[in-house]
Amino acid sequence: MSKLTFSLILFFPIFLIAGNFLINLFYISVSILSVLNFHQEKDFFRSNIFYLLIFFLIYLCINLIFSINFYNSYPRVIKFLLIILFVKEIVNFNNKGEIYIERIMRFWSVLFFIVTIDVIFEIIFGFNTLGFKSYMPGRIASFFGDELVVGTFYHFFSLMVLSYLVKNKYSNFFIISLIILIICISFMIGERANFIKLFFSILIISFLILEIGFIKKIGMTFLTFLIVGGIFYSNDNIKSRYYNQIGNIYSVDGFKKFFKESQYGAHQSTAYQIFKDNTLLGVGLKNFREESKKSKYENPDYKRSNQRQATHPHQIHLELLSELGLIGYISFLVMIIYSIIVSAKNYFKKKNPYQLSTLIYIISCLIPIIPSGSIFSTFFGGLFWFSFGLMISFNKNLKLKV
């Protein structure tokens, strides 16, 4: 077992906090180790998931030929090759023994509680323990500074920490108290989409792995709603974030009104139009930013149509459809859905809570309509593919079962 691989995975949360340079360095380093350990875990190369990953990579290479901007697209094709190597190394690492995963989860739990304390500090004082302050009212920055992504970080690592606590038989009272605290903190972080994803993720994981009666689980959920409601009514910034800024949603045909008046609506409508114009192959990876600025995508039905240009359309499904077309979108879905089904079957057989956490996280990232990061971005994409690799790594005997 590579001690370097262990060290890199151990410090993964710190790389996320430190920024894009170290996140990319982390992925490149693990991919290089994967090449150096190429002779290990040969079953991975005979697994259906590996074949599906390779098929998707081949499609990306073909799609590159038809990309409207080759130079924008080819780095992401290379990045996906690194993702395959990275996934292979995660599978190889996890098969070396559960003891290493336990050490990692213990360290991650400590870091998670440090971030939790820092977020609470910022909620109370308006700046974090290092003096960072969010530039947007109602949002929390924590250690991430100008990158308001602590909600995404909190979503993933809260699931992993809860799984660690359940697996190591911590008291139900402590775990339930922590669940309520995590949901409330996520709510106060102010990232609406991530709060929705985290809330339903934790709700699912709680009902599946908490060893308490169904009535107590319902009571816990009801108590959480009461506390979140109290926070909402007592905090003007939170009230503005979750009500005033999206007030249209709560009216008749509210979602449609909000969609047509929001910048997210402008992004996603443009992505759909790009897909309609380039149905089979899309415009190529990382080219939404190029295509969306064209005047033909102006739409007077959308209030912020003049703000439609962005690095990505802030929705995974529309990102894939607009940039990779229907063929690429179906290829991606087949790969992901197959991996989810195999991993879900393995979870219900082995009952490994870490696999359940990664499984739920991947599914939550794929919820339609709700805004999301880019599947190929450094931070959101990095967490997604790390979770994917960890999810399938718990499927033992890859040759036979994956």
Image: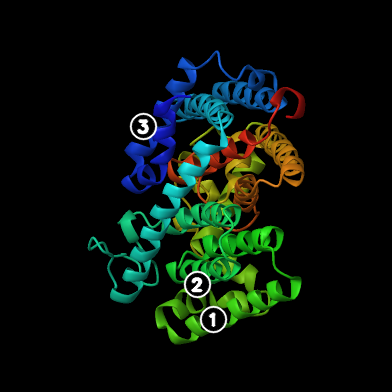
Residue 135 image point, x, y percent: 31, 65
- Provide the secondary structure element on which disc 1 rests: helix
Extreme-top residue of the structure? 39
- Provide the secondary structure element on which disc 3 rests: helix
State the separation of the CA atoms marked 1 and 2. Answer: 7 Å
The answer to whether the residue labelled 1 contacts the one labelled 2, judged by CB atoms less than 8 Å apart, is yes
Of 202 and 212, nearer the camera is: 212
Extreme-left residue of the structure? 131
- Provide the secondary structure element on which disc 2 rests: helix
State the separation of the CA atoms marked 3 and 2. Answer: 33 Å
Residue linked to disc 1: 227
Mark 1 burial class by Cα count in 10 Å: few <14, some 14-19, many 20+ = some
Of 210 and 192, nearer the camera is: 210
Quick check: 138 left or right of 326? Answer: left
Residue 67 visible (yes or no): no
Residue 298 image point, x, y percent: 52, 53
State the separation of the CA atoms marked 3 and 1. Answer: 41 Å
The answer to whether the residue labelled 3 contacts the one labelled 2, judged by CB atoms less than 8 Å apart, is no
Q: In this view, does 68 lie above or below 254?
A: above
User: Of discs 3 and 1, which sits in the foreground?
Assistant: 1
| Sooner in the amino-acid sequence: mark 1 or mark 2 | 2
Q: Quadrant of the C terminus?
A: top right
Quarter of the view holding residue 248: bottom right
Residue 186 image point, x, y percent: 48, 66
For image coordinates 53% across by 29% down, the residue present is 93
Model colouring: rainbow
Residue linked to disc 3: 25
For image coordinates 70% across by 75% down, the residue present is 216
Q: Which amino acid does label 3 sit on?
A: Leu
For image coordinates 62% across by 78% down, the residue present is 250
Q: What residue type is labelled 2?
A: Cys
Residue linked to disc 2: 184
